[in-house]
Amino acid sequence: MGMPADVSLLSLPALVPEQQHLVGYIPTVMGPVEFREWKQQLERINGILGLSGVEETFQRLSLARRNDEARHQAEERKRPFRELSAGEQAEYQRLSSQALRVNVARTLTGESLRDFGCRLAESMLLQWFCRLDRIDTVRIPGKSALQRFSQWLPEEKMRQVIGTLLGAASAADADGQRLELKEALDLEAYFLDTTCVKLHIHFPVDWVLLRDAARTLMKATMLIRRRGLKARMEEPAEFLKRMNQLCIKMTHARRKKDAKRARKAILREMKKLEKVIAAHAVRHRTLLEQRGEETDLKQGEALQIIGRIDKVLEQLPQAVRQAHERIIGQRQVPNKEKILSLYEDDAAVYVRGKAGAEVEFGRQLLLAESESGVIVDWELVCGPVRADTKMLSRSLERVKQGGGGAVPGKVCGDRGFDSKANRVLLERAGIYNAICPKAPSELQQRMQEPEFVELQQRRSQTEARMSIFKNGFLGSPVMSKGSENQKREVAWSVLTHNLWVLARLPHGRAQALAKAS
């Protein structure tokens, strides 16, 4: 199953030649073998980015998106659209290339924006890989620039970039393999599994939501008061202190004999304090909205603070009711009505039923890998958890669209993907069904098929692939906020993971040189 680049790439803007700058050199470092392996890995990935056309595709997609945004802004302002000059386009291509390489390097290291900025400033190897090395002055992007790089392209565009990489890795002609692999990737077999991606949220205890609301509202109030807009109230830090004291009391109340009565009394105090905090936040929000031009805040910064307050105030009544129902009313709240986080609207309860992870809170993630270990499809579910049986057809459709109409020849998964509808779907598509049946009798019968047994044995490696991807590339928990940013981060992690896998595969040219010598 090939994964060629999308046909729409032919209509993207052409690139212009970029001016070459004098760059430094990477000294030969004698010592730890880990550094030599790290250097070889970056050198191999650097070669793959060029040979596969990934870097060119990324630049062209970035340029097309920039032109579309500029054209849209010109239409809104009723101004003529101006094309970029050759010099401006070359500079934007250079920035796009930096964004691609910086994101790949940061995902490989697994560091935060601030930490990676420091490491980038002191590492000549990373500066070379990210094309930041210069003879005279090295300009390292700061935290804000690194964050803009991480949001350079949306997820749907990143799928085209990854499709370009898979297409180059799976294609071979008379001249050999484009990426100089010993063998082209075999994408015939398709292994699926789902997991839960943990989000960066507090454990959803009901009264913790009230503490989170108090912190967000009072911190936003502090920002407004520092700009000289003040309404009559005690210092915001005093309210935070009182809320923290009540949280400590709530934590220790469960150890008392009359724990239920004590927790109810503490929650009533928290509700009273939360009402006062919300009233102060509303007054300061109104001041900022009416007199924001008197402060040094930009319009976007003021709107950000106002939006932060509004988002919490909108959910606060439901959070209070939820805590009241659970602690005072002693009644359960259905999962679909629960607020798990004030900041992640789509966080869901994921019932795992596993030792140490009976229930997890986050987002559902589908991954599909080939036999060589590269990820060919993924889906981050934003909202309620979906049945695995419902995700197979969408995954196959995405692979078909990205692969120019081609579909895998074999599909393998655990029993969660088994259903009558999926069996019919695979049979009609002419795809070998290696999904583990739910019925024990049917499983016993299928275990007589050598191909089925072989694919099921290979499927056990997919569990390890999920762990490698989540812990080594995506991060657990995911630190980005919002569904769009998280989907984009998953796409960057998939691209980096596939580059890492390809860089570790046997190199055809290296083996040929070794035999010749």
Image (cartoon, helix red, strand yellow):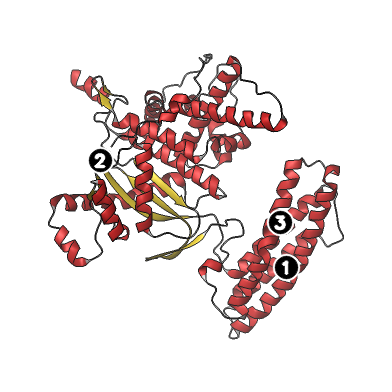
Task: For marks 1 and 3, give the CA distance.
Answer: 15 Å
Earlier residue among tags 1 and 3:
1
Q: In percent of the image, x 32 and y 60: which residue is there?
A: 416
Identity, as a three-letter code, of the amino acid under mark 2:
Glu
Which quadrant holds residue 422? bottom left
Query: Is label 2 or label 1 in front?
Result: 2
Q: Where is residue 122 in the image (x, y as percent from the top left)?
A: 54, 30
Q: Position of residue 55 (x, y in %)?
A: 45, 26
Q: In the rendered image, which quarter contains the C terminus?
A: top left
Report the residue marked by disc 2: 188
Report the residue marked by disc 3: 310
Mark 1 residue crowding within 10 angstroms, few (<14) / some (14–19) / many (20+): many
Task: For marks 2 and 3, give the CA distance.
Answer: 50 Å
Q: In percent of the image, x 76 and y 50: which residue is there?
A: 223
Report the residue marked by disc 1: 274
Disc 2, SS = loop
Earlier residue among tags 2 and 1:
2
Closest to the observer, 114 or 13:
13
Identity, as a three-letter code, of the amino acid under mark 3:
Asp
Closest to the observer, 33 or 55:
55
Task: For marks 2 and 1, give the CA distance.
Answer: 58 Å
- 324, above or below 111, in the image: below
Mark 3 residue crowding within 10 angstroms, few (<14) / some (14–19) / many (20+): some
Q: In percent of the image, x 61 and y 32: which residue is there?
A: 69
Q: Position of residue 227 (x, y in %)?
A: 82, 47
Q: In the rendered image, which quarter contains the N terminus?
A: top left
Closest to the observer, 428 or 219:
428
Furthest residue to the bottom? 257
Mark 2 residue crowding within 10 angstroms, few (<14) / some (14–19) / many (20+): some
Quick check: 304 left or right of 196? right
